[in-house]
Image (spheres, helix red, strand yellow):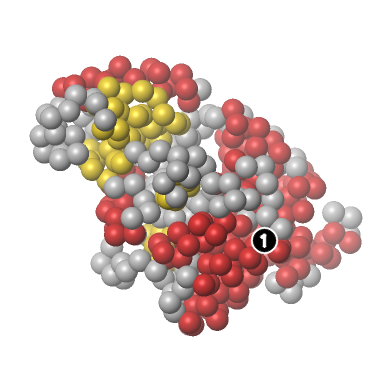
Amino acid sequence: MAINRMQELLPRVDKYLQERDWDDVAAMRGHHFKATPLAAGEYNLNYLITSNSVRLVLRVNIGTQIQRDDQIIYEYKALELLKPSGMTPRPYFVDDSRKFFDRGILIMEYLPGEALDYRRDLPDAAGLLAAIHQLEVPPGKNHLICEDAPLTLIYEECAGLLQTYFDSQLADPDIRAYLKELINWAAEARTAEKFYRQDPWPCIVNTEVNSGNFIVNRQKSTIFLVDWEMPRWADPSLDLCHFCAPLTTLWKANWRMGDDKKRELLEMYSRHLADRHLRDTLAERVRLCDPFVYLRGMSWSAMAWIAYQTEFAGMKNPDTWTKLQQYMDLKFIRSIFDPVIRSQGNNHLQKEEKNGY
């Protein structure tokens, strides 16, 4: 379990902090830090390190979702790009030497607060996303994975993830059949990405904008977005669709965003945009992207549902397993995809439903 793994590594984290000379890191110079477990995910273990009034986060990377050996360097460079926004943790140190740990280490700013509340914090979240999406990052001069063909890239990612489910004896036959219909639909529908190629608006996107990755400090009236392990250089609709997606809002908050709330969120986001053309095209960007972002979340869930019962490279989280069991239900899956597929003007899945799905 993640908690046990964090406790097992704790003496090594303390030893790492004690044995290294930190004079070359301004935020840590002259301090002697002690570590305590903070939070664990499937791919990272986070420790709070403290010395007097100084509190930082030490992050031990234990896996990657972007299939890169330099995962921790990728995240560190992203945080460097994001520093001007003032809405993300400041990075202080990165170590990918693998001499002490077999994975990379990142030390960054600790941001106290609580997770985003969808019922209270939508205006602040809209402002934060708009600010980050308008951050000036020179195109072609950053390290970010570029999604210039976003729908095809998502389709290919989903096809790979879903194959784990399709090939498994654990798979439910009805769910397998429906997911195959979805991926076949996506193979054809991805041609709509010509919209993004003809009218690009690339920016830095987080791709994991769930409520648990926002830090809201109500006393200071601040909001931050953390966890930048897999950002992209892509269309802002990727973040907006992910933020509003049922799979996202249900993940930590057990809340489902209705159509009215989604329209409200997009309207609030638009008010912060300086580019009139982006405001005018935002609805279409989101409409085309919605089913693909939903499919990405469901494909990962299907893969993880199998992996959690067989072999999983990351840490197994009991809350994640509970949520995966909720998601891998045919009625739930259809409640996500049937409405959004209809909105695309494609009747293929609806025909299958009439034929006894």
Question: Is the residue 254 above or below the residue 81 in the image?
Answer: above
Q: Secondary structure at mark 1?
A: helix
Residue 299 showing in the rendered view: no
Residue 250, image quadrant: top right
Q: In the visual, does 265 lie left or right of 234?
A: right
Question: Residue 29: x and y, percent?
Answer: 14, 34
Residue 244 showing in the rendered view: yes
Residue at the front extreme of this rendering: 219
Question: Is the residue 264 above or below the residue 177 in the image?
Answer: below
Front-most of residues 54 and 249: 54
Q: In the visual, does 192 lie left or right of 108?
A: right
User: Residue at (44%, 55%) from the top-left corner?
Assistant: 206
User: Residue at (41%, 29%) from the top-left corner?
Assistant: 38
Question: Is the residue 332 above or below the residue 106 in the image?
Answer: below
Disc 1: CA contacts within 10 A as few (<14), some (14-19) or many (>=20)? some
Q: Check disc 1 and report the residue beneath it.
A: 261
Q: In the visual, does 230 lie left or right of 312?
A: left
The number of callouts visible is 1
Amino acid type assigned to the residue bearing label 1 in the image: Lys
Question: Residue 21: x and y, percent?
Answer: 12, 29
Front-most of residues 320 and 47: 47
